[in-house]
Image: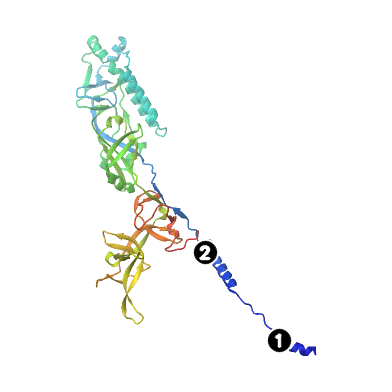
Amino acid sequence: MSNNNDNNLIRFTKEHNFGFGTVLFLGIFIYVVIVLFIYFSSDPIVRYEVVEGSLSSQNIYRAIAVRDEHVIQSPYSGYVNFLAREGQKVAVGDIVYTVDETGKLNEYLESQSLLENTLTDKELDDFKNELVDFSHSYDPVSYTEVYSFKYSLQNSVLKLANSNFLESLRQAQDEGGLSTAVKYCTSSEAGVVSYWIDGFENFDPANISMDTFDERKYEKTNISANELRAEGDVVYKLSESEDWYIIFPIKETDAESFEKQGYILCRFLRNQYESWGAVSIIRNDKDVFCRLDFNNSMSSFVNERFLDVELILNEETGLKVPNSSIIEKEFYLINENYVIFDTVNNIYYVILSGYDDTGQPITIRKEISVYSHDEEAHVYYVDETFLTAGDTLHMENSQQVFVIKDKGTLTGVYNINKGYADFKEITIISQNDEYAIVKPNSTYGLRVYDYIALKADTVSDDQFINE
């Protein structure tokens, strides 16, 4: 009986019913797995916040000073004593030095105690100022300058003393019978006196090269007082004009900017003196040099050939972006008469030739993305994604057509504000090795506090950014 009952039992197979919640969970799980895979298998996109700023650059240069220098030679042989100080302005007819042809002058002055001289307060102040100037400008790297200063100091002492015993000298000539042995040598021109030579006296800027600035090859000869000189030997130099210039090497990228400014304010680091110089650019093979011309302060630096200077430039301010963010991209160039702006929907579009399902020609209104407008060339830069070379565009309310073919390149960055890479045009104002200053608030460009991709080469157009 029981067996019959068992035979009458009907077994139902349990159905696996996947509800909506299960499907939703599986979908989310798969999405998370895909996102995690993409994130860990690709390089992370580092973002950079655009800020306002300027380029902080070291505008300090080592320059060569070039001035109008006339080398003066002695017409006599004998012991030379300087009466004019280094850097002193002399007029026509002023006594610059004397020549003792016999060598008996010093002996007579010593025997008569005429060499004992005192300096005035002004002369002492000048002497102290020379010491202070050197202490402020001393650079242990340029130790050879110490020797130049030593000779300059010795000459200063002798010249200060010599200028005081001029009366003693004349007395010695009268009393010691030296009237013909000592020659007074005067200046034939007005100018500033210096007592050294270095071969740059007739320097031609057309021959400048980087080798000119190699100070290891530089030789400066100081002309010392109370030394025996032959006829024709150099005794001093005379700089007759306040017009002078400095010249120094620069980068090619700076040449256009400097030349555009016309005049640059220059600070001389030795004494912090500032003066405006007229700019000119000199090119010699692959090297570029900047020349700054001045019409004052020559006498302040008459004893210097090499000068450290700082250029106080009119630095441009704008949006500061890293060079690694900058990229170039190609676009189609579309005549502006064929691009229409919809003021209601705030979009750009073109009227494109096409065909319907039956193959009949029609015109299609197609939305486009505009990345720049060149008002001079009368063209828009349009993304290649929206159009194809050979497409025919129609002018609104006209029978004229335009065939797409030409391309142009824009410089820009990838804006990632919206979570995907969107190219934005930039106009670079100035640039150094690390950053560029970009024109702010342009129609198609960046705004302050925008986020951009730090490395443009790690991003592609319209790529979604996983942060």
Residue 19 appearing in the image: yes
Q: What residue do we see at 35% from left, 25% from top? A: 130
To which residue does mark 2 refer? 38
Give me the C-alpha separation between circle 2 and circle 1. Answer: 52 Å
Amino acid on which disc 1 is placed: Ile
Dot in front, 2 or 1 = 1
Lower sequence index among marks 2 and 1: 1
| Image coords of residue 404 (percent x, y) | 30, 69
Query: Is 26 left or right of 307, judged from the image as shown?
Result: right
| Image coords of residue 37 (percent x, y) | 54, 64
The image shows residue 148, relative to residue 445, as above or below, that is: above
To which residue does mark 1 refer? 10
Q: Element under label 2?
A: helix
Query: Is 86 left or right of 321, judged from the image as shown?
Result: left
The image shows residue 259, relative to residue 132, as above or below, that is: below
The image shows residue 215, relative to residue 227, as above or below, that is: below
Amino acid on which disc 2 is placed: Ile
| Image coords of residue 283 (percent x, y) | 28, 46
